[in-house]
Amino acid sequence: MALRKEHELFFELSIASVFESAGKDDLALQFYMRAKDVKLPFNHPDLAFAYCGLGSVAYHMEEPAFALRLYLKAKEIRERTLGGDTVDTATVYNNLGCCMFFLERNEESKGYFDLANAILECELGSQHERTLTSLKNLQKIKKSAFGFQGPEFRPLYYIGIPHPAPKAKKKKKGKKGKKKK
C-alpha cells in the first residue's frame, strides 16, 4: 500500500515539475497540491517534496512570504525525518535564505546561506554545483545593497600599544624673571 502511495506521489510531482519548467505555474500548483494530499506515513522523508515544489512555484510567482512558509514546513519535515546535516535539508536552507533575502531579512538570510554552504561543502565538496550556488548566494548577501553589517559586539578589553616613535622629552628651561639680591 505504501509503495502505491509513493508511486502516486512521484507521478504527481513529476507532472508538476514539467509544468513548472514550462512556466505553467497554475497547472504546476494543481499537481503539487495533489501531491501534498497523498497520504504517506508521518516519518516519510518524501513528504517534503510537495512543499518544496509549492515553495518553488510561489517564489517564482513573486510570493516570497508564502514560499517562506512552505519552505519552513519542508524544513520541519526534512529535519525530523533526515536530520539537519543532509544535502536535501541544506537545499531547503538555501531556499529559505533566498526567501529571506527577497523579504529583506538579511541577517536570517545570511544565517541560512552560511548553514547551507557549510553542509553542502562538507557533503558534496567545494566544486559541486549546489555548493557553488550556495556560495554565490552567500557572497551576494555579503555584497548586497542592503549593507549587511553583521552583529556588533563591545570589545571585551583593550590592549595598550605603545607608540612606535615616542616623543623625546623636552628639557626644562630655567625661569626668567628678576634675580634675587
Image (cartoon, helix red, strand yellow):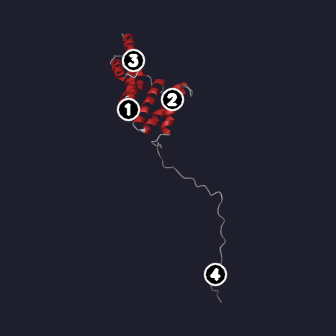
Front residue of 133/176: it is 133
Graded by Cα atoms within 10 Å as few (under 14), some (14 to 19) or many (20 or more), the crowding at tag 4 reads few
User: Residue 64 got which mark?
Assistant: 1
Camera-near label (4 vs 1) is 1
How far is mark 4 from mark 1, CA to CA? 81 Å
Q: Which residue, given by chain and number where applicable, does mark 4 sit on? A: 176
The image quarter in which residue 163 lies: bottom right
Picture coordinates of residue 5 (x, y %)?
Answer: 36, 13
User: Residue 114 got which mark?
Assistant: none
Q: Which residue, given by chain and number where applicable, does mark 3 sit on? A: 13
- Disc 2 residue type? Thr
Work out whether mark 4 precedes mark 1 in sequence or the reverse, and give the earlier one.
Answer: 1
How far is mark 2 from mark 1, CA to CA? 19 Å
Q: Which residue, given by chain and number where applicable, does mark 2 sit on? A: 133
Front residue of 124/148: it is 148
- Residue drawn at x 39%, y 29% as measured from the top left: 59
Camera-near label (4 vs 2) is 2
Tell me if label 1 and label 3 are in contact, CB under 8 Å: no
- Disc 1 residue type? Pro
Graded by Cα atoms within 10 Å as few (under 14), some (14 to 19) or many (20 or more), the crowding at tag 2 reads some
